[in-house]
């Protein structure tokens, strides 16, 4: 028989092939193949005692032959735990969150839990939608880098037993565990470092002011300048979205005019990268200190001096607290602040241009 394309069609004969996308094998299928009762299969699958070695071997052979996988959904209904936790990040593409996410995953894995993550894209509505979607899938706990400043929507979930820890920024309008880097102290130290190398006209370019870390780093900048007795001009400060065009314009404005800044403090890694590009084409040396380390910072000429956070420690500390909540060993929410570290590589040690 030929079809309309001219290809010869050979009818299938004999046994019909199994449906590749058919139903998954069940414990009943395993029991029938192994010639044992359903309870025996359940004991083998769940690692319970009461099964002889020979019977256990037969059941395992049946499991392997059929490709059976345990239905954890049924276990959730019986035990009330999913052995899964959610991680809500600001932006999965941001290099800062790579080691943080990996650290959370390693702690979760050590506790036999699966990590499910997603990105809020710095949108409070999307954050809430994602968090509640994870709760609807009955995750045991949540690690959240918040985009919004009102987390009262989480109160029913927390009361229902969902362990929750916030990272990098505190929760808004609820009491919850939070693990932070010392954004204020790190920025103050970074700006004080520039002042110690002779700078007085120092620009600050940061993220949106409603973001906790951006506000704290601006506060650190202001404090360092005040401690040194240096009045700050409004034109030296620029906060807003961190897209390259906005940051480039801010940097170029600070570097223009008869009294330009001689140094810039960049409020996060994305700002630092854009400022490095601007300074590469600038006609005179300008000192730079960035908050957050950036890739290849040590290979640039000069290397980029940074205030480094330990992103992995943030994730690990938050995840460990999450599982302590789940174990019932933590009751009172705490605020944990991790130190930052100034790494000098050359750009922050340049003297003011004459």
Image: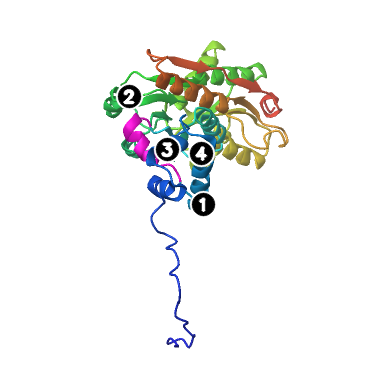
Secondary-structure class at tag 4: helix
Residue 166: x and y, percent? Answer: 42, 25
Q: Which mark is residue 40?
A: 3
Secondary-structure class at tag 3: helix
Nearest-to-viewer mark from 3 and 2:
3
Q: Nearer the viewer, residue 54 or 316?
A: 54
Which residue is the site of mark 2?
Answer: 161
Which residue is the site of mark 1?
Answer: 65
In the rendered structure, which segment of residues is drawn in magenta? 69-81
- State how far apart marks 1 and 4 are (Cα): 14 Å
In the image, is residue 73 part of the stretch drawn in magenta?
yes
- State how far apart marks 3 and 1 are (Cα): 17 Å
Nearest-to-viewer mark from 3 and 1:
3
Q: Are marks 3 and 2 in contact (CB under 8 Å)?
A: no
Q: Are marks 1 and 4 in contact (CB under 8 Å)?
A: no
- Tell me which label, 1 or 4, sits earlier in the chain: 4
Nearest-to-viewer mark from 1 and 4:
4
Relative to residue 329, is residue 298 drawn left or right? right
């Amino acid at each position: 028989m030929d079809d309309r394309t001219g290809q010869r069609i050979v009818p299938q004969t004999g046994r019909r092939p199994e449906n590749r996308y058919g139903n998954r094998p069940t414990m009943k299928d395993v029991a029938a193949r192994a010639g044992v009762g359903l309870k025996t299969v359940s004991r083998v699958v769940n690692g319970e005692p009461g099964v002889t070695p020979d019977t256990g071997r037969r059941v395992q052979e049946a499991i392997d032959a059929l490709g059976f996988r345990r239905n954890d959904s049924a276990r959730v209904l019986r035990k009330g735990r999913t052995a899964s936790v959610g991680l809500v990040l600001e932006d999965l593409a941001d290099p800062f969150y790579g080691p943080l996410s990996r650290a959370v995953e390693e702690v979760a894995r050590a506790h036999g839990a699966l990590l499910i993550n997603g990105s809020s894209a710095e949108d409070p509505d999307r954050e809430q939608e994602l968090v509640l979607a994870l709760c609807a899938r009955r995750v045991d706990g949540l690690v959240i880098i918040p985009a919004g400043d009102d987390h009262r929507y989480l109160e029913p979930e927390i009361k229902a037993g969902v362990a929750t820890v916030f990272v990098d920024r505190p929760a808004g309008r609820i009491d919850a565990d939070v693990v932070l880097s010392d954004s204020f102290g790190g920025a103050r130290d970074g700006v004080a470092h520039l002042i110690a190398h002779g700078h007085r006209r120092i620009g600050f370019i940061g993220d949106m002011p409603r973001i906790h870390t951006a506000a704290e780093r601006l506060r650190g900048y202001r404090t360092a300048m005040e401690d040194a007795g240096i009045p700050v001009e409004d034109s030296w400060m620029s906060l807003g979205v961190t897209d390259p065009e906005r940051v480039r314009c801010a940097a170029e404005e600070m570097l223009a005019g008869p009294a330009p800044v001689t140094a810039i403090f960049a409020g996060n890694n994305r700002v630092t990268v854009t400022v490095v590009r601007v300074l590469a084409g600038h006609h005179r040396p300008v000192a730079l200190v960035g908050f957050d380390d950036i890739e290849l910072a040590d290979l640039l000429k000069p290397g980029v001096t940074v205030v480094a956070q330990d992103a992995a420690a943030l994730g690990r500390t938050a995840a460990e607290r999450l599982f302590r909540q789940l174990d019932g060993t933590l009751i009172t929410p705490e605020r944990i602040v991790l130190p930052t570290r100034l790494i000098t590589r050359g750009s922050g040690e340049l003297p003011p241009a004459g």
